[in-house]
Amino acid sequence: MNQITPILTRREAQAEDVALRQALHRFVTGRLRDGIEGEDIVQETYVRLYDYRRKRPIADTAAFCFAVARNLVHDHFRRLRAQPPAAELAEDIACPLPRVDEVLDYRQRVEILVRALNVMPPLRREIFLRRRLDGVPGAVVAADLGMTLAAVDKHCTRALADLRYALERRGLAIGGGA
C-alpha cells in the first residue's frame, strides 16, 4: 500500500508552526506560571528540535516538541528544588568596602603626605618612618643614630607638624573630613 503524505504549502506550514508555538507556549506557561521562563523553554524546545532533525527524521513534530517541553519543565523544577532558598536582602546591610569618594579622599591624602615626606629633611624623615611606620622604639632609634631620646622625640614632633601643615595647606584635616 502506498501512503500519500500531504504536501503543505509554505503558508500552511508557517501557520502550523505558529499554532504549534502558541500551543507549546500555553502548555509550558500553564505549568510554570511564568511567561518569561516559559518563552525560554519554548525557545530551547525549538533548538533541540532543530538539532535532533539534523541527525534523524521526526515522524510527529508536535509530539516531539511537547515531550521535550515537558522534560524541560521537569528539569526547571528540579533545578529550583536543588537551589538553596534565596535569602532576603536587608536594606540596612552596609557594604564593607569604602565608598568611592572616601577612596579618592584617602588617595589624595596619601599623595600629599608622600610629597611632604619627600621634601622633609632626610634625618627627620628617617626618624619619623622608623618610629611611626616601622614601630621601632625611640631608645633604639636614638642609640642607632647616636642621639638622645629627646632629640628623636623632637624630630617626630616636627615631622608630624610638617605633615599636618601639608594637609591643612590644601584644606584637609589630619583626622579626616574636608
Image: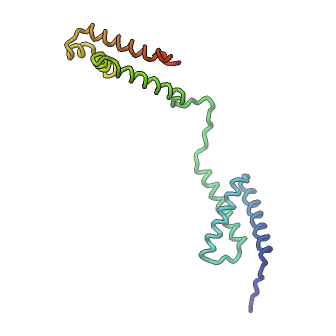
Instruction: Identify the image quadrant of residue 14.
Output: bottom right
The percent coordinates of residue 133 (x first, y second) are: 34, 21
Left or right of 164 in this view: 14: right
Left or right of 38 in this view: 152: left
The percent coordinates of residue 84 (x first, y second) are: 58, 45
Q: Residue at x 70, y 57 (%)?
A: 39
Say how the picture is coloured. Answer: rainbow
Left or right of 150 in this view: 36: right
Residue farthest toward the bottom in the current orientation of the protein: 1
Instruction: Identify the image quadrant of residue 32.
Output: bottom right
Q: How many marks?
A: 0
> In which quadrant is the N terminus drawn?
bottom right
Q: Residue at x 79, y 78 (%)?
A: 9
Is 60 located above or below residue 110 in the figure?
A: below
The answer to which of 93 and 152 lies nearer the viewer is 152
The percent coordinates of residue 136 (x first, y second) are: 28, 19
Q: Residue at x 69, y 68 (%)?
A: 65
Q: Residue at x 43, y 17 (%)?
A: 166
Left or right of 10 in this view: 134: left
The answer to which of 53 and 130 lies nearer the viewer is 130
Is 95 located above or below residue 68 in the figure?
A: above
